[in-house]
Image: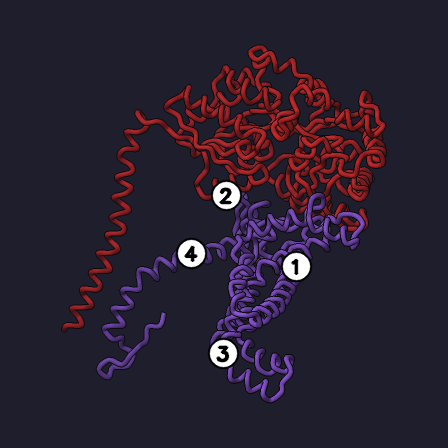
Chain colours: A purple, B red
Amino acid sequence: MSTKLTKNNGREGRWSASSKLAAMLIAPSLLVMGMIILYPLIHAVWLSFFNYKLTRPDDIAFTLTKNYLRMVQDETFWLAVKNTLIFTLFTVIISLVLGMIMAIAIDQLPKRFSGLRGFILVPWVVPGIVVGYLFMYMFDVEVGVVNFILQKFQIIQEFLPWLMNDKLSMIAIIIAHIWNQTPFYMLMFSAGLMAIPEDVKEAAYVEGASRWQEFWHITFPYLKGIVAITSLLMVIRNFNNFPIIFTMTGGGPVYSTTTSVIYIYRLAFEQYEMGYASAVGAVWVIVLLIVSIFYIKALQKDF
Amino acid sequence: MKKNFLNVIALLMVIVFSLTLFGCDQKATEVKEEPKKEAKKEEPVTITWVNWVSTEEGTRDKIKSVVDQFEKDNPNIKVDIKPVPVSDIQNQLTIMVTGKNAPDISQVHPDDVIALAAMGALEPVDELLSADFKADLHQSLLDLTTFEGTRYGIPWAPAGPGFLYNKKLMEQAGLDPKNPPNTIYEFTEALEIAKKNLPKDVIGFQLDTTIRTIGLQHEWPFMRAFGALPIDGNNIDIDTPEMKEYAEWLRTVVKNGYTLPGKKYGEFRPMAAQGRLLFAFDGSYLRGIVTSLNTEITDQIFNETWGVASLPGTKDGKHYASPDDHFLVAFKDSENKEAVAKFAEYLVNSDYSLKNYINPVGFVPATKSAIQRVPEISQDPIRSAFIEKIVPTVVPLPYGPNYSSVATAFMAGMQEVITTDKPIDEILSKLQTKVEEASK
């Protein structure tokens, strides 16, 4: 809300009539939105202070810090944090690099190929749950096309249990997310490339700059802002990513692809530990808020 | 003055708008409530039924026909089917109950009955069902879902996994189909021989290794075959030589490719329908599912192909099977309990349901009178073998309010055994602590 306090007849701090009117008209929607957004948040934080297990309604008790202390000692929680960081880091960096390469490659193509951008966007618009199922079958130990291709090219001898190996499963979900998210970066970078003034590029050619020099000294500086903003946006998105991971592995095998949101889900809806799940959720909200602050600052920054 | 007037007008608009909203809501509630009071007597009631049989290809059409017939026989009751996949059933019901949006009736597993009863969500069956119907039910099944002295589950379709062996594949592998493996050691030996002699795409046996309560139920008889009893009431005893032997066996069967890791046990059924599964650990209804998945397989072909035996047992020939019976539960918040009871009794014991669902799918009926009323049930070799060889070996699982936490923690440990190279001792020792924590 950007309602400003204005001076009214020399009396400082008083609201103008139009500001008051605006505030009153906005108030009902703010009230409704506040209830929708704040109530669940406050309720979750409140729940985090309780020993609250859905299957034990007779055993609900206020414990204040017990859930938070448990979190500090909970190996699985820290493993989930580690998995989230690995998953996000690799997904964002690889998607970003691929997205930029694709955008530059398409930018070089003649105009009649401009429709290709729309075609490449398809993975981005496919719902996460569908992407999850697609890749689950592609990586299936018995009928998966990935194993089939790798065996055809004699890279592997036996079919690999991609989704049932603690190391391979993380690689599989990262690949699925890269496929899903790269078009988004490509779209953003394509828009950025279009904004580079032609005369700057031409000046570089006239000065005899190589393609690499042109990229490094002209293209990339123009794309820096997009790199920062999209990366932060996708870090937030991947910190919260749920459907593809849940569909492909459910967080398994064991906890090898359990990210923080999957862990919260497993605690809340497989083990019904609402109190502890709320505590993990509350901590995760704080982490996301911190990343969001960086994102908002990046938006305001002039790159 | 003009500005003040504007402020007053705006304030009035906000108040009027807010009141209108509340008023509309109030009016809507009033409008909704009035006919509802009258409707209870005259209009048909609708009961919501959550189940997984409507999601599965092998049972979907058959159960739809039973519901349609029930609605014809009871024109005042409509059944709103809410299909939920089997693996999500407890989760979805817990969410529904917590959100004060429980269905009227649901299909559940026995462990779900206890979990929901512990939440205080269920209606006790003794007050719900008719005396005749209760007397007709097999009492052991009715007693299986007792929580704190009260019975909450209505036995519908007893379906504990038995040991089904593909006689044709056994012959092809050089094994004797008249002499299926009797102990877990003979079973492992048979898998080894079959792996060498059968085509690559044949899967040795069906084993659920997912982190689900069903996973524990599926693996339980194998653990017992090694003499392990990892959870017995409040006694957690995982770090034992017997469990170590089981875990090493589990790691070996996965590494040697005798089974597919990470699969739900239902995912092996298409392989059975394609003639690519040597040993199945499934319910008596496997025939119904296989014949639905592969229409070239008739009941006769299935009966000629598959045999039933007690699950591979201990060295000294003790056999164990776990219960996985399909139950029905009525929810305490249901406003149509009478209709729910009528529907439940119809599903379990009506001639139509027995002839068109229980019998063709291959379930064992839950009532004693069913066999007299539908004789073809007892003439079925698969079902007879289940009644004779599997049902007497059923042992209870460690059900309780924490069963879900305990089972998922336990199965996470079993997955660690098959997906990592960590020493078994280390895994079991950690698992002991984790399961102890989960059981608190």
Q: Could you tell me which chain the residue with mark 3 belongs to?
A: A
Whole-number angstrom distance, CA of label 2 to CA of label 3: 43 Å
Q: Amino acid at mark 1?
A: Asn
Q: Which numbered mark, 4 or 3, is in the foreground of this view?
A: 3
Q: Which residue is mark 1?
A: A83
Residues at circles 4 and 2 in contact by the CB criterion of under 8 Å: no
Q: Which residue is mark 4?
A: A39
On the image, which quarter does residue B295 sit in?
top right
On the image, which quarter does residue B310 sit in?
top right
Q: Secondary structure at mark 2?
A: helix
Are marks 2 and 1 in one subunit? no
Location of residue A100 in the rendering, given as x and y in whole percent from the top left corner: 59, 70
Q: Which residue is mark 3?
A: A301
Quadrant of the image for the N terminus of chain A?
bottom left
Location of residue B329 in the rendering, given as x and y in whole percent from the top left corner: 51, 30
Q: Could you tell me which chain the residue with mark 4 belongs to?
A: A
Whole-number angstrom distance, CA of label 4 to CA of label 3: 32 Å
Location of residue B321 in the rendering, given as x and y in whole percent from the top left corner: 71, 28
Left or right side of B369 for B383 = right
Q: Which numbered mark, 4 or 1, is in the foreground of this view?
A: 1
Whole-number angstrom distance, CA of label 3 to CA of label 1: 31 Å
Q: Could you tell me which chain the residue with mark 2 belongs to?
A: B
| Among numbered discs 4 and 1, the one appearing first in the sequence | 4
Q: Amino acid at mark 3?
A: Lys
Q: Which residue is mark 2?
A: B95
Residue at position x 45%, y 21% in the image: B69
